[in-house]
Amino acid sequence: MVFKMDKTYDAERIEKKWQDYWEKNNIYKFDSKSKKKIFSIDVPPIYASAGHLHIGHALHYTQFEIIARFKRMKGYNVYFAPCFDDNGLPTEKYVEEKYNLDKTKISKKEFRELCLKESEKVEKEYVDKVFRRLGHSYDWSLLYRTIDKNSQRISQWSFLDLYKKKLLYRDEGPTIWCIKHQTALAQAEVESVNRTTKLNYVKFGDLIIATTRPELISSCVGIFVNPKDKRYSKFIGKKVKVPLFNHEVKVMKDEDVDPDFGTGCLMISTIGDFFDIGYWKKHKLDLRISINKDGTLNENAGKYKGLTINKAREEILKDLNKESLLIKQEELEQTVGTCWRCNTPVEYIVTKQWFIKTLKYKKELIKQGRKVKWYPDFYRKRFEDWINNLQWDWCISRQRYYGVPIPVWYSKDGKVILSSENDLPVDPIYDKPKNFKGEFVPEEDIFDTWMTSSLTPELAVKFNKKLLPMDYRAQSSDIINTWSFYTILKSYYHFRDIPWKDIAIGTFVLDDKGKGMSKSKGNVVWADEVLKKYDVDTLRYWVGAATFGNDISYSENEMLAGKRFLTKLWNASRFSLMHLKDYKPKKVKLEAFDEYFLFKLNEIIRKYIKYFENYKIGDAKRIIDNFFWNYFCDNYLEIVKKRLYNNIGMKTESAKYTLYTLLTIILKLYAPIVPHITEEIYSNFENKSIHLSDFPKIEKYENKIEKLGNEALDIIVKVRKFKADNKKSLKEHIKLTLNDNNLEMFKEDLEAVCNAKIIFGKEFKVEF
């Protein structure tokens, strides 16, 4: 055994040394020819336009990377494909802001090429400065991007397959719309935001209605009252004139109207919100749209045409007030739907879009979700609640530039012309439909980014159905309604199967005040800044404290604790290796304390494996930390010093065997969390990488050793306290009376570590 440990741990040199070694020797490469059991991970594709990665990203991606390392050491052939999400609105937004350009002023082709170029730049930075720097054990040969040709092909195949199975359709009707990005949205992309607004009481002839959206008075197509509300029974069936716009609408009854909200009269406009849509469909009302796709008002708004929504509201309220039609205003707390990307309140515009059927299959999708193991399990309830509350089919078409094209054209009479599967991927704007003669129009819309991201299991394994379903998906809780839902849906629709066996919901990082980190709050800590100050394994040690589903705080104190741990691990290992020079491990008859500490660590291994298999990394780290600090460093190393420094035959051999075994197991248990320092120390024992070494096995020991060992260890604690209370050095010699003859087997080690003369008597006693 070679001993080559410097006095202090040189993190920068050692990290680079092992990262280069791992890459050069393909340590983490998936072996397609191996007969080992496969463990496959569905990795979250990170947005290539995210700019900096904050500490939350570093934690999330390192958290499941730790799982990959554990499974690899457990003997699995790990399929771990890195990926980037460079298809979608965030990339468009990033490019527009960086170049200060209006994408509508250049060709789609030029804009797409610019997006691709910028994505590749950002991705390279992420790979070199973040993921490789963090020591992530991906198989880089499996890298995929959600905009690459293979991803486009699989995404377009999904569309064709769903079309043939009659699971998607094209329809014209009310669409959730973002006026800022000027594109349709799916229900899952709408976030609820609480705000304070004004409830405006407006005269409609002899009636008074209360509305928060006076700018939509021009779109009013009906007034509704509750049939049990006697105040308005005489108005039902009559017509009233709409103020300022002077068209007449009918007063109708509907028992869903809340008599206690506002005045009990409900104005239905087309279309203000989802409730308007419900009344519009139920009562077959007229469609009178006043808002354009860009958020300005159209000709139905009369003199207010061309004004933005906010400006129109301001002007209409002025005019209502001027004509004594605005009776009063009250502040109102309300919840509005906003675009999840820009926080702009959504509108409802009538457009023609592609939809995947979801409402019809709610029960089946809930059943599929129950076939997956959720960690923690309570997140499955959130998944089911989302499905139960769905009110829209999934809108998959987007009026954007950069994304996967929808593989269809339309004939002159409006019939759909599908691309052939053999021709995929296609871009209908630049490609022509084969085997079709006549005039056609290309589909210019592209897919919702989730249309592709919902296929990450298929993208990751390159559509190798033998690797499906995958074993494990890690993701954050805020996209259960999108990524997990859509992935489960697609897997069911295409293959009547689940996409993965396990799903673990990641950890949110809190600032030092206990608030969740986010760019918008301005309280994020950037990962690259942390890595300038602290070494990688210090950061990873902090990540190891996190357990899926539980939030964790970030603070400088946590980083300093990690730094102290690495120093302790280095020093304890260095001390141990000094006594193991030229040692070749061989089984020997164990001394009592040696057997006891091996027993205790054996129990740790058992619990550690169970914790990891349930994605409770933080709990696994906690128990190995406790053993390392309290048992190994504070006690075992002190107990065996005499036997290590003095050659006492088999007693010293027992100490060396135990020291070797304890240290190598400790290193292996820490290896998934702190891979660089453990690799460096372990290289003194083996030429083989620790990350490819055999995981510690659970051995059999006599249970009775635990009770006696606990008693013996408790004696050491009591002696230390006695000396401290009497302000004496630990080296001070004492007389120790023990009242349990069964502890005879620990006598020599107890005398050495306590610096005591031990006798056995009727009661326990410590004296100078």
Image (cartoon, rainbow, N blue to C red):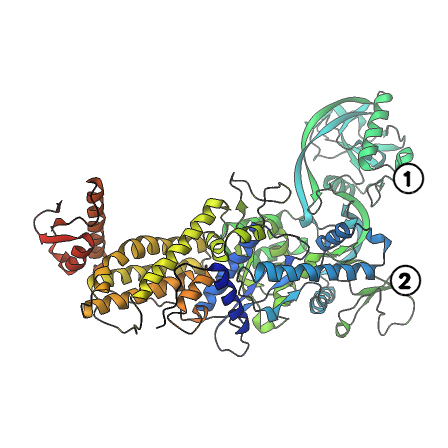
Viewer-nearest residue: 413 or 439: 439
- Judging depth in this view, the residue of 685 and 415 nearest the camera is 685
Q: Residue at 73% across / 52% down in the picture?
A: 94
The disc placed on residue 567 is: none
Categorize mark 1 by other alpha carbons within 10 Å: few (<14), some (14-19), many (20+).
some
In the rendered image, residue 349, in percent from the top left (x then y), is placed at 80, 45
Which element is circle 2 on? Answer: loop
SS at circle 1: helix
Whole-percent x and y of residue 499?
58, 63
Q: Quadrant of residue 725?
A: top left
403 with respect to 644 (left or right): right
Instruction: Check disc 2 and report the residue beneath it.
Output: 413
Which comes before the other along the chain, label 2 or label 1? 1
The three-letter code of the residue at mark 2 reads Asp
Give me the C-alpha separation between circle 2 and circle 1: 29 Å
Q: Residue at x 65, y 66 (%)?
A: 144
Residue wearing tag 1: 299
Image quadrant in which the N terminus is located = bottom left
Q: Residue furthest left?
A: 761
